[in-house]
Image (cartoon, helix red, strand yellow):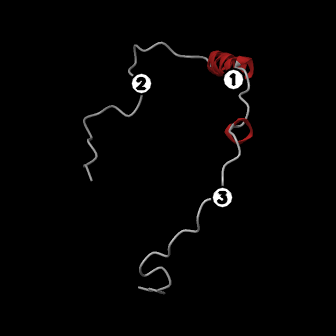
């Protein structure tokens, strides 16, 4: 774990421009609108199981060594 450095300022410097909360909310809304429009514009893919040919059922899995042990710590 690192130590907390006291020489780092805890707030923005005095000369930094202040961002208005309305501007922040507008920027967040624009970001999420753009992200959602990209997701909605993407074509939906059919499920892989529906397009794949029917396969034979897999053979039952062999039990692993120690599978039935009840180990408590």
Left or right of 65 in this view: 29: right
- Give the mark nearest the N terminus, 3 or 1: 1
Give the alpha-carbon distance from disc 2 to disc 1, as whole Å.
35 Å
50 over 20 or under it: above or below:
below
Q: Which residue does the numbered mark 3 point to in the structure image?
A: 57
Left or right of 15 in this view: 44: right
Residue 18, x across and y down, in percent: 52, 16
Local SS, label 1: helix
Mark count:
3
Local SS, label 3: loop
Q: Which residue does the numbered mark 2 point to in the structure image?
A: 12
Q: Which residue does the numbered mark 1 point to in the structure image?
A: 39
Please give the label number shown on residue 71: none
Residue 65, x across and y down, in percent: 41, 79
Residue 19, x across and y down, in percent: 55, 16
- Give the mark nearest the N terminus, 2 or 1: 2
**Nearer-the-camera pick, 40 or 18:** 40
């Amino acid at each position: 774990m690192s130590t907390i450095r006291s020489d780092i300022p805890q707030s923005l410097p005095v000369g930094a421009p202040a961002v208005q909360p309305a501007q922040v909310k507008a920027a967040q809304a624009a970001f999420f609108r753009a992200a959602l429009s990209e997701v909605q514009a993407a074509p939906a893919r059919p499920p892989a199981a529906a397009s794949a040919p029917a396969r034979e059922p897999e053979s039952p899995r062999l039990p692993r060594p120690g599978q039935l042990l009840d180990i408590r710590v």
